Image: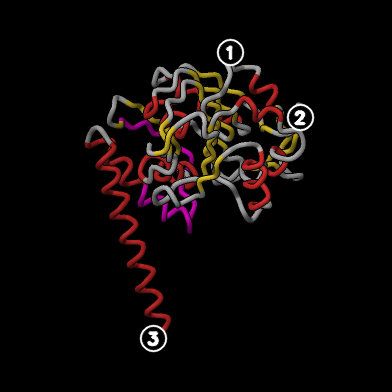
Amino acid sequence: MTNLLTRGIGRLTRTARGLVSELSGAWRVTDDLGSFGRIASDFLLFRVLSVVSLPTINQERTVRLRGDIALTYRLNRGDIQSFREVWLDDSYLLPFSLEPRTLVDLGANIGLTSLWLAKRYRAERVIAVEASPDNARLVRKNLEQNGIAAEVIAAAVGPRDGTVRFNLHRNSNQGRIHPDGTEVPMVSMATVLARVPNRPVDLLKMDIEGGEQALLEGDLAWLDSIAAIIAEFHPLLVDYPRLTSKLESEGFRYIPANSAHPNSMDAFLRPSRAQDGA
């Protein structure tokens, strides 16, 4: 009984600390009280949604962030978790100096990372690839309403052009290629890079929920067009050490996740392209 009580108190303490951190971060990034109140209440609802389904699930809301940014997301755990990861935790802060004129975002979700990277690093052109049709719709909305020059490709990315089955997960940031999923288009990196008018691609962002295994196997000639990569790998779904080693063998220097700063993603850089110290 004592151990159960201790674990319960510990869980409540961690939840309270997490919520305080989220509210502090929301206050830091929002531009007005209404937007802060909206995000603060959704962080509370994020926890409610783990145990019950609300009638307002997937309802859209638009908030204003500092820097004259309008951001649209939905009331679901995936969108809210992604907001926290990108805008509060700075998970995509680059661990090297780089001014990416061209950004390719694989697994763009609802466009939060594309928008964050474009605004922070002043990218001039974004190519965003997203398999979920509803997510892709929000990618377009978030980039268009912030004046980001972008092309959105509503497809999964993989080793070839064609179709693939994609699981549209209830958590919007966890959809992935799966044999029991819905059929969606799939594009190869050759097709994606054909949309980039002036190569090389300065920055490739990758978060494709295990699809990185198939993408990084086979012919990797397309990597010659990539200067730097920031990625979220999924060790439970892929051979993580093999994939990082393959990128190193292609001439990238590997900067492991959480080594540059807390919550940082895996990053890879061609040493001739930039200097350390973002």
Depth check: give the residue in front, 38 or 175. Answer: 175
Question: How would you rate the neighbour count of disc 2 (Cα within 10 Å): few for under 14, some for 14-19, many for 20 or more?
Answer: some
Q: Please provide the residue range marked out in magenta.
A: 43-64
Depth check: give the residue in front, 27 or 44. Answer: 27
Q: Earlier in the sequence, mark 3 or mark 2?
A: 3
Does residue 205 appear to the left or right of 154 in the view shown?
left
Question: How would you rate the neighbour count of disc 1 (Cα within 10 Å): few for under 14, some for 14-19, many for 20 or more?
Answer: few
Mark 2 belongs to which amino acid?
A: Arg
Distance from Cα at disc 3 to Cα at disc 2: 57 Å
- Looking at the picture, how far across and down is residue 207, in whole percent? 57, 40
- Looking at the picture, how far across and down is residue 263, in whole percent? 43, 50
Distance from Cα at disc 1 to Cα at disc 3: 64 Å
- The residue that disc 2 covers is 160
Distance from Cα at disc 1 to Cα at disc 2: 21 Å
Question: How would you rate the neighbour count of disc 3 (Cα within 10 Å): few for under 14, some for 14-19, many for 20 or more?
Answer: few
Residue at horizontal 58%, vertical 13%? Answer: 197
User: Which image quadrant: the C terminus?
Assistant: top left
- Disc assigned to residue 2: 3
> Residue lying farthest left?
33
For residue 221, above or below residue 166: above
Q: Earlier in the sequence, mark 1 or mark 3?
A: 3
Q: Is residue 69 magenta?
A: no
